[in-house]
Image: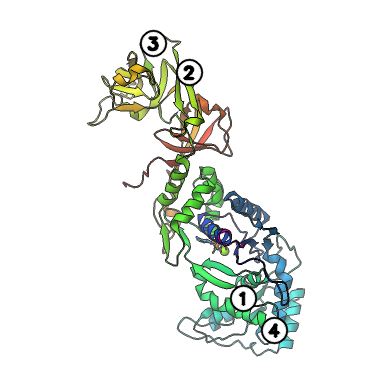
Amino acid sequence: MQLGGPPDPSPIRTRFPPEPNGYLHIGHAKSICLNFGLALDYAGRCHMRFDDTNPVKEDQEYVDGILDAVRWLGFSWDAGGEDNLYFASDYFGWFYEIAEHLIRAGHAYVDSQSADEMRVARGTLTEPGRDSPYRARTPDESLALLREMRAGSYAQGTHVLRARIDMASPNINLRDPVLYRIRFAHHHRTGDAWCIYPMYDYAHPLSDALENVTHSLCTLEFEDHRPFYDWILERAAEGGFFQRPLPRQIEFARLNMTYTVTSKRKLQSLVQSGAVDGWDDPRMPTLVGLRRRGYTPESIRLFAERIGVSKAHQWVDPSVLEGALRDDLDAKAARAFAVLDPLKLELTDVPADFDEPCAAPVHPHHPDRGQRRFALTREVWIEREDFQAQPPKGFFRLFPGNRVRLKHGVVVECTGFEADADGRPTKVLATVLPDSKSGTPGADAYKVKGNIHWVSARHGLPAEVRMYDRLFTDPTPDAGDKDWLASLNPAAKRVVRAVVEPTLATAAADERFQFERHGYFVADRVDHRPGAPVFNLAVTLKDSWAKK
Ligand code: ATP
Ligand code: MG
């Protein structure tokens, strides 16, 4: 680490440096896959580092949540015999020593202007800034003040430590940026040990250098900060704190996803206002939300691979994320029947105790995964939309006089229906065609166009199914001056009482299924119980937004 230390055995070091002030979202997943992925590709290391230098908004809850999310995505900071879990707050002592060095070397001074005075004197993009009247303070004077600031002798806002660079620089980030400010705030790790805290732009490059990071990847907004990143590391290296080569900052475009927001602050306000049911609400673009929604780590890594990394600003449609999940689950998820909007179908020509065993593959491409077994009974549930009293042209499911196959069961012919006073069907009536059972020699003799799913009314399990859609109706809810909450989608969550096939009695929390003809669903990791199943819609079988 320091001059004269042993050479670093790792060819590259990257880091993932979140601030523990919220839960990670899909944008962070891009950064995680990039940083940890590069380390894996080049036999290097990726450090997990908490940028916990701002005591006010940070919390242990978020530290734990972030570690969980990175592990869930399948990455590890504990690699090659090193446990690379770090906290920038552990470096407070170092940062402070370097600050004293900068003052002694003439590169920093304590400024005592008010925040307003500093802002005005900073200038604008077109006008240079003005030197602070305190800029000429001697190192001794500034050092004494910094020590008193650290000792708690001054009120918040009275003094700051600034770099002495160039108030006329065309890059505003080089107009004597603030390095330290006074904050009487309790820190979630260092407690009350400090009442001065370093600024992000100061702490970040020093943390990178302390950890021997080689490639410090960050989003494009930090491009203008790079000259200061390099400046501070050069000054610290001149002081003998670090050995060259120094870390390099490299920018990439952040991920922006349409129909959602990816800012921890906005996500937090959705949680606090009750617009969603928590950070892990399946409508949220957080990793805990996506996980509860049914996303797999593999699907998110596949998504990161597909969107790639570049310097071009990136807006990604959620269909790309959804496509990755479909592609991952198609090969994995067991199939099942679920009727989401149940309408009763009665087979009028079989006895009341009819109980005909039927079988269907767990997965159509993996016969080795065996068969699901369930029985056909006199009364079954079908999807309300699979029956039409007066069928529109081209409708080939159930209507009076038409035949369909009850998938993996028998062929039936609709003989009529019962309806309520408003004409809404309450029960469909049908008869069974002889020798039509799936898998028997006679089955192929029947040519029917419709093939519908069903669940026995006697054996089916009632289930709560939560149908989810996009959180916002506007593709860019927070662009420009929009009121970003105005386009919250009130229909983003809909709860239905469904009936599912009896084999789902053994579904475990987090287990994913393809409900045939509907989409992929997951047993909710929080609320699902074997006796009271709860499933979440992860993604529909087809992109239902594509046509809109
Ligand atoms: P937010 O505004 O949501 O809090 P942030 O950038 O402040 O985001 P950090 O915790 O500081 O959040 O981010 C940790 C890392 O994740 C940073 O290196 C940051 O560049 C990266 N990151 C954050 N958001 C995105 C995004 N949308 N796309 C790609 N990388 C991101
Ligand atoms: Mg941040």
Asked if residue 547 lies left or right of residue 222, the reply is: left
- Residue of label 3: 350
Q: Position of residue 526 (x, y in %)?
A: 59, 39
> What SS does tag 1 mark?
loop
- Residue of label 1: 246
> What SS does tag 4 mark?
helix
Q: Amino acid at mark 1?
A: Leu
> What SS does tag 2 mark?
loop
Task: Using the image as rendered, state which of residue 297 and residue 272 is in the foreground.
Answer: 297
Q: Position of residue 316 (x, y in %)?
A: 42, 56
Which quadrant holds residue 383?
top left
- Residue of label 2: 458
Task: Look at the magenta stretch and give its main secondary structure.
Answer: loop
Q: Is residue 92 magenta?
A: no
Mark sitting earlier along the chain (3/1): 1
Q: Position of residue 406 (x, y in %)?
A: 37, 23
Asked if residue 425 lies left or right of residue 112, the reply is: left
Which of labels 2 and 1 is toward the front? 1
Q: Is residue 42 magenta?
A: yes
Give the residues in magenta.
40-44
Q: CA distance from mark 1 to mark 4?
A: 21 Å
Q: Amino acid at mark 3?
A: Val
Q: CA distance from mark 4 to mark 3?
A: 93 Å
